């Protein structure tokens, strides 16, 4: 599949919106890798809005820029691929792909993939919702390790959202339908879990700011040992200790002039700031936000021309790595 030939219509768009003094704005070399299923686009854009690379996709819930400069992503709920971005008008080169709907016994089964990760040994971790398992596959797609999930409310669409393998060999998995984050050891034993609270509120349907629930999207193990959780339609970030005490939080209406909706990806920056996704929040609100731990807004990103109201995943590339256009 070739890259999209859409014009670079946002070259002059200032995608980053000042929310603090100019010296706190992101460096001009910073890039963003992001994906939005409503516009069917995954793209790398510069801080000034210039599109450096883009490709057509379907549904997506995970993406990665790999150390070799390739991009690992999905273009459907079962099909994963790694591509070397094309340059000078050349098409992308697909160097690896995996279809969870057709491989390793999943034929004729209902399965969706909402998370995956390239591991240091070259294998790829894949979470299979509906099948209820995590697998690691080699370059040829052969399973080299697997474990089963603990699921209270099995759901093909919502068994998992993001999952990451930790440095200790464990797996930290957000279970959307269960409203829980669980840490599994290599044998599949749950060694820690946290039920995302509803704080006394009743669930409310929808995807935007009006919705409410505990459909957690992602979790990040911090250097302190605490866990930072993006609560999805809980409109919040929660930092919890191993003892499950909330020691820091950001709720829906705490940031001036900003309302949170589906809080999705989390990225801890080298300076300790937090970058997170604000999906389904409508054009009134930014899609990506950076804050410090005192909840000061450093910058926001809002671009409803390249992306839309379903920008679920993003990764900030502060050293200007990734496709150069």
Image (cartoon, helix red, strand yellow):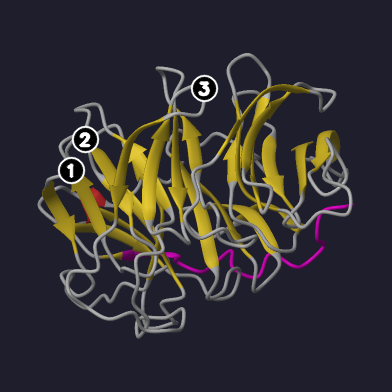
Choose top left, top right, bottom left or bottom right for residue 190.
Answer: top left
The answer to whether residue 145 is magenta is: no
Q: Point out the stretch of residues depicted in magenta.
A: 1-17
Circle 3 residue: 187
Q: Nearer the viewer, mark 2 or mark 1?
A: 1
- Observer-nearest of 198 and 275: 198
Whether residue 266 appears in this view of the structure is: no
Mark 3 → mark 1, Cα distance in angstroms: 23 Å
Residue 94 placement, left or right of 66: right
Q: Position of residue 315 (x, y in %)?
A: 49, 46
Tag 1 secondary structure? loop
Q: Nearer the viewer, mark 3 or mark 2?
A: 3
Q: Which percent across, then down, holds residue 20?
A: 19, 60
Distance in Å between CA atoms under marks 3 and 2: 23 Å
Label 3–label 1 contact, CB within 8 A? no
> Mark 3: which secondary structure?
loop
Classify 108 as above or below 253: above
Q: For mark 1, what is the residue? A: 244
Q: Along the horizontal axis of the image, is 184 left or right of 238? A: right
Which mark is on residue 208? none
Residue 10 lies within the magenta run: yes
Q: Quadrant of residue 259?
A: bottom left
Q: Circle 2 — which element?
A: loop
Residue most toward the top?
121
Q: Which residue is mark 2?
A: 226
């Amino acid at each position: 599949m070739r890259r999209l030939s859409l014009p670079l219509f946002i070259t002059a768009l200032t995608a980053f919106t000042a929310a603090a003094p100019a010296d706190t704005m992101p460096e001009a070399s910073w890039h963003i890798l992001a994906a939005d299923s409503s516009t069917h686009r995954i793209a790398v854009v510069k801080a000034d809005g210039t599109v450096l690379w883009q490709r057509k996709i379907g549904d997506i819930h995970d993406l990665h820029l790999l150390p070799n400069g390739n991009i690992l992503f999905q273009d459907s709920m079962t099909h994963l691929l790694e591509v070397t971005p094309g340059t000078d008008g050349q098409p992308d080169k697909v160097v690896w792909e995996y279809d969870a709907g057709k491989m390793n016994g999943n034929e004729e089964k209902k399965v969706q993939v909402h998370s995956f990760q390239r591991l240091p040994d070259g294998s790829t971790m894949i979470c299979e919702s509906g099948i209820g398992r995590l697998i690691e596959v080699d370059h040829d797609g052969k399973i080299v390790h697997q474990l089963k999930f603990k699921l209270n409310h099995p759901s093909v669409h919502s068994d998992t959202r993001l999952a990451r393998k930790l440095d200790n060999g464990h797996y930290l998995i957000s279970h959307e339908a269960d409203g829980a984050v669980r840490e599994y050891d290599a044998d599949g034993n749950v060694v820690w879990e946290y039920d995302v609270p509803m704080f006394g509120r009743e669930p409310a349907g929808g995807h935007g700011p009006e919705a409410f629930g505990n459909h957690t999207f992602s979790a990040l193990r911090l250097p302190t040992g605490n866990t930072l959780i993006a609560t999805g339609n809980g409109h919040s970030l929660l930092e919890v200790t191993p003892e499950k005490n909330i020691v820091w939080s950001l709720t829906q209406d705490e940031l001036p002039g900003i309302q949170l909706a589906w809080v999705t990806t989390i990225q801890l920056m080298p300076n300790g700031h937090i970058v997170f996704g604000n999906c389904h929040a409508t054009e009134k609100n930014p899609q990506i936000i950076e804050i410090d731990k005192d909840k000061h807004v450093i910058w926001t990103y809002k671009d409803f021309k390249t992306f839309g109201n379903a920008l679920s995943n993003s990764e900030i590339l502060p050293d200007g790595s990734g496709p150069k256009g």
